[in-house]
Image (cartoon, helix red, strand yellow):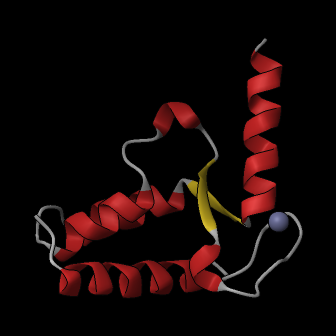
């Protein structure tokens, strides 16, 4: 399993991926705390694995970083509010 040190490395990795994607919510521009931003998959069908999980997998050598980068490319950065709202919208559209 992952150690505290691995978790820390995973957070650093996640921050740098978030930063490389603009470091702000694509909907409202919120950027007060980069580590709070969510990776929202544009197409849920193409989602392989959640980004935070992949960051951990890369850190422990379980998965190559290319997989993480490809997955991050399928996502938009959203703040928690926009992410929750979009999820709500998607759920309600499906009904
Ligand atoms: Zn937002």
Q: Residue furthest front?
A: 4
Image position of 17 (left or right of 43): left
Determine whether 74 is above or below 79 in the image. Answer: above
Question: In percent of the image, x 17 and y 62: which residue is there?
Answer: 63
Q: Quadrant of the N terminus?
A: bottom left
Give the quadrant of residue 35.
bottom right
On screen, residue 12 versus residue 8, left or right, reads: right
Q: Nearer the viewer, residue 67 or 87?
A: 87
Q: Residue at x 49, y 84 (%)?
A: 15
Q: Position of residue 46 (x, y in %)?
A: 48, 37
Name the quadrant containing residue 25.
Answer: bottom right
Residue 21 image point, x, y percent: 60, 77
Quadrant where the C terminus lies? top right
Seen as rendered, the residue at the extreme right is 28
Residue 78: name its quadrant: bottom right
* Residue visible at 21% across and 82% down in the picture: 4
- Number of callouts in the render? 0
> In the image, is residue 47 above or below residue 75?
above
Residue 59 picture location, percent across and down = 20, 76
Instruction: Give the left or right position of residue 68, taking residue 31 as reference.
Output: left
Residue 65 rendering spot, x and y as whole percentages: 26, 71
Left or right of 51: which side holds 84?
A: right
Q: Relative to 4, does residue 77 appear above or below in the rendering?
A: above
Q: Quadrant of ligand 1?
A: bottom right
Residue at 85%, 76% (x, y): give it: 29
């Amino acid at each position: 399993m992952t150690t505290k040190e691995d978790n820390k490395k995973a957070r650093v990795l996640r921050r740098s991926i978030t930063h490389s994607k603009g470091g702000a919510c694509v909907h409202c521009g919120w950027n007060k705390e980069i580590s709070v931003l969510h990776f929202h998959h544009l197409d849920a069908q193409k989602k392989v694995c959640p980004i935070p999980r992949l960051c951990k997998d890369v850190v422990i050598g379980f998965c190559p970083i290319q997989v993480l980068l490809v997955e991050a490319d399928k996502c938009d950065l959203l703040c928690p509010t926009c992410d929750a709202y979009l999820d709500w919208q998607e759920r309600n559209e499906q009904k």
